[in-house]
Amino acid sequence: MPTFVALLRGVNVGKARRVPMAELRAMLIGLGYTDVATLLNSGNAVFKAHGGVSAKHAADIAAALVHSLEFEVPVIVKSQAELAAIVAENPLAVASQGLSRLLVAFVPDAKTLSGLEAIEGLVVAPERFALGKRAAYLHCPAGIPGSKAGEALLGKAGQRVTTRNWATVLKLHAMARGAAATSR
């Protein structure tokens, strides 16, 4: 059974748009997903599904969130293989102490990814930005706050994406690999 990762955008950041992880797990199980696990309190879930494609799972989860929470939550879903490719294609190596300062922008499609090209013009050394085939990567060694590129990626320019820091991406990747290994 294929393994997927769901990434919710902009939840549990302030008092608005609260999505309790226990409710998210229960909702995913209610949608027929199995082996559901969440990571942190920021809208990350790993689950197994009887087939289907990432975009369909994202739409189903987003619709269920509207139904149960009565507000919209953008959802991006990646298969375990897609997430593995995003991890493998990261061109920005960082030391372990910099994992939280490397952002990965997950996109629903290639058109959205190409729309992030404008961020390159906001990068100020020693920041680095790279567009991959499936995601964008931004490293802000001095921190995300105060970075014009970081603010753009997290703000208006990144409205159709969701970001996770590299440490979280690696944890999700490990969870997805572990879940995929148990279904063999």
Image (spheres, rainbow, N blue to C red):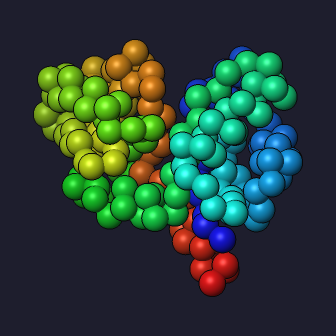
Of 85 and 100, nearer the camera is 85
Residue 55 position within the rendered picture, expressed as x and y whole percent measured from the top left? 54, 43
Name the quarter where the C terminus is drawn: bottom right
Along the viewing direction, whichever of 121 and 57 lies nearer the viewer: 57
Quarter residue 108 falls in: top left
Residue 32, given in percent of the width and then of the height, sits at 80, 54
What residue is at 32 percent from the left and 38 percent from the top?
110
Foreground residue among 55 and 95:
55
Name the residue at 55% across, 71% down.
Answer: 177
Name which residue lies at 70% across and 52% down: 38
Image position of 67 with respect to 162: above or below:
above
Q: Is residue 57 visible?
A: yes
Please state the horizontal and vertical placement of residue 31, each as a whole percent of the image.
80, 47
Q: Quadrant of residue 84?
A: bottom left
Q: Residue at x 28, y 26 (%)?
A: 115
Q: Position of residue 60 (x, y in %)?
A: 69, 39
